[in-house]
Amino acid sequence: MLTRPTWINFGDADLRVLRFLWDDARVHHDFTGDAATVLAAARTMAVRARLVLLLGLSEWVVWRFDGLHRRKEPGEIIEAAWCGTVDPRYLAFFELTREQWVGPVEGPLWCALTFLEDGFRESYAVEADTFRAISFVYRLAFHVIPDRRPFASWMTAILNRFTTTYPRLPDDPIADLFDRRIAQRLGPLIGRDALDPSLPIDAARGRAFLVNLIGQVREEENPFLASEGDLKDRRFVGIPYAVP
């Protein structure tokens, strides 16, 4: 199981204290963050970089509520989503029952994980879904994080890093009309360490992380990792779970 990374820093805040408004019936109406700068940067990134950005934002929300609930799903979904950065189809389609995820802890988790799945599902074909997910999860994180200063510093550093290192690539959908080479169209592989502004990007280390995690997630039979049958239904061709 992944542990909280060092780049997620809540300062001296007591995470047990919830100082934000939450109403499951209105959710984003109380958000005050502006995602315009984040979206402008995301539009200049490769598809895989957008997915990693979305996943990084989701981790901020998941770790903010660590220890305040007993659910296994948030950690399992985060791990499966990291596998999905290799090929989005590796993240299984899922729906969490809304009525079972309510309140100021599980409500935000439901929102983050639901938008994460939606942002991944057709990311290689419908970029608007990913942009919508990035916007929502960024504003959600801004709303629930107790001390926004470390988050804001991280956000600035990562946007600068990703727009420079992982620029948007030209994509000709006709060249892969039947979506047989999705993983090759997303841009360079990106490991979890790329989200740590204090570390230089190391492609080999990032690939090793993904290889090891996929092996671990398969061994643990993570329910959010797509099965080989799921991949076949989504027209996957090649060796499943391989890292290019």
Image (tube, rainbow, N blue to C red):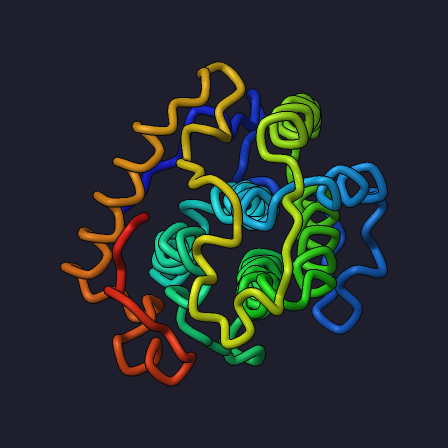
Residue 177, given in percent of the width and then of the height, sits at 55, 74
Tell me if residue 103 can be seen: no
Instruction: State the residue at coordinates (45%, 50%).
Output: 68
- Using residue 217 as the reference point, say whether residue 188 is left or right of it: right
In the foreground, 67 or 187: 187
Instruction: State the residue at coordinates (70%, 69%).
Output: 24
Residue 26, given in percent of the width and then of the height, sits at 79, 68
* Residue 17 sits above or below residue 221 on the image: above
- Using residue 100 as the reference point, say whether residue 45 is left or right of it: right
Residue 227 location, quadrant: bottom left
Tell me if residue 11 can be seen: yes
In the foreground, 180 or 2: 180
Residue 9, given in percent of the width and then of the height, sits at 53, 26
Residue 123, given in percent of the width and then of the height, sits at 59, 62
Instruction: State the residue at coordinates (19%, 51%).
Output: 216
* Residue 194 sits above or below residue 98 on the image: above
In the foreground, 110 or 106: 110
Q: Identify the residue at the far left of this view.
A: 219
* Residue 47 sits above or below residue 195 on the image: below
Residue 14 location, quadrant: top right
- Image mark count: 0
Instruction: State the residue at coordinates (48%, 24%).
Output: 196
* Residue 124 sits above or below residue 8 on the image: below
